[in-house]
Image (cartoon, rainbow, N blue to C red):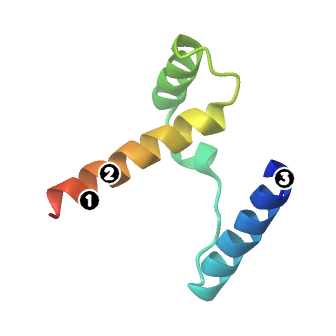
Amino acid sequence: MTDDERFKEEFKRFQGMLAGARIRRGTVWKHLSPEILDWLLDETIKLRQPDIGIVIASLVRDAYHDDMEASE
């Protein structure tokens, strides 16, 4: 299975989870202040990452692991 096929499969699974829980995907940008967006852009540049989505995913992943460690 190629990376593209794996991504499409995971994306369909994620869409199904959202639909099943009646949760909208939403728009991140509407809920972030200009100051936070500036910081996010600075972090993306600092990390030399061409995809801001990867930086956001990294932040979410870190928050998730912190939460899981706190609940142990």
Q: Is residue 61 above or below residue 11?
A: above
Question: How far apart, in angstroms, are the residues tagged by discs 1 and 2?
Answer: 5 Å
Other-residue count near label 1 (Cα within 10 Å), few / some / many at <14 / 14–19 / ≥20? few
Q: Identify residue for label 1.
A: 68
| One can see residue 21 in this view | yes
Q: Secondary structure at mark 2?
A: helix
Q: Residue at x 59, y 49 (%)?
A: 28
Quadrant assignment for the N terminus: bottom right
Question: Looking at the image, do the residues carrying marks 1 and 2 touch, with CB atoms under 8 Å apart?
Answer: yes
Q: Position of residue 59 (x, y in %)?
A: 44, 40
Q: Is residue 17 above or below residue 27?
A: below
Looking at the image, which is closer to me, 54 or 40?
54
* Figure quadrant of residue 17: bottom right
Which numbered marker is on residue 2?
A: 3
Question: Looking at the image, do the residues carrying marks 3 and 2 touch, with CB atoms under 8 Å apart?
Answer: no
Q: Residue at x 53, y 48 (%)?
A: 31
* Figure quadrant of residue 26: bottom right
Q: Secondary structure at mark 3?
A: loop
Report the side of 13 relative to 30 (left or right): right
Question: How far apart, in angstroms, are the residues tagged by discs 1 and 3?
Answer: 31 Å
Which numbered marker is on residue 65?
A: 2
Callout 3, which amino acid? Thr
Quadrant assignment for the C terminus: bottom left
Which numbered marker is on residue 51?
A: none
